[in-house]
Amino acid sequence: MKSCVVFCGSSEGNDTEIIDQGYQLGAYLANNDIDLVYGAGKIGIMGKVAQGALENKGRVIGVIPEFLKLKEVVHLGLTELHVTNNMHERKLLMHDLSDSVITLPGGYGTLEELFEMVTWGQLGLHQKPMGILNTSGFYDDMLGLLENMVRKGFLKMSNFEMLIVDDNIERLIEKMNNYQPVEVPKWIKKELT
């Protein structure tokens, strides 16, 4: 892993372990020469991740759409700041700038970003490792729902297993470094060529 896009909340929430894990993830990425790509905010969990990386001399690349580029939101002390026209361009650029994905706790936007990346992976548009840092069991209920999708025949087990889950940063990164991408279905390969 050389660069990692991190999806997480623009709010801090009320769990101090989650707040601390955000900072620790940023620090871990910096200390292991992995560039942080994220939503360019100075607030919330995303701000903590950036702070952890910057305070450990990491390279931090922010990507934000023009309409969110407000002084009280955007982090102006980043290594690079990219401003896009809209949210769609933002996600595509974050994808292009990273070779892996980690999702921390967050709200609707975090889930939307995660599931778009997972869907792109399922369709064979990328083969990046996609991790969930499941701090305090935050994503347990979501993972239960996904397992139910597998049981009910709406999701293949191989696609469920594309998500790499752990509650420990070092173990999560190790699993991601050892990730073997799933085989892209033949009908999709044919369309992509």
Image (cartoon, rainbow, N blue to C red):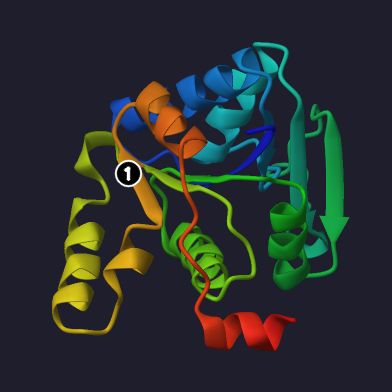
* Direction from residue 123 to residue 161 in the image, left or right: left
* Direction from residue 136 to residue 101 in the image, left or right: right
- Is any part of residue 185 visible from this angle? yes
The number of numbered badges drawn on the structure is: 1
SS for callout 1: strand
- Is any part of residue 70 visible from this angle? no
Residue type, numbered disc 1 = Val
Name the residue carrying label 1. 165
Residue at 56% over, 39% down: 46
* Image quarter of the N terminus: top right
Q: Nearer the viewer, residue 43 or 64?
A: 64
* Direction from residue 137 to residue 189 in the image, left or right: right
Residue at 75% over, 81% down: 193
Q: Is residue 158 above or below residue 51?
A: below
Residue 87, position in %: x, y? 70, 68
Residue 51, position in %: x, y? 62, 23
Residue 9, position in %: x, y? 48, 48
Residue at 72% over, 12% down: 57
Question: Where on the picture, by quarter, is residue 126?
Answer: bottom right
Residue at 56% over, 30% down: 49
Q: Is residue 6 above or below residue 119?
A: above
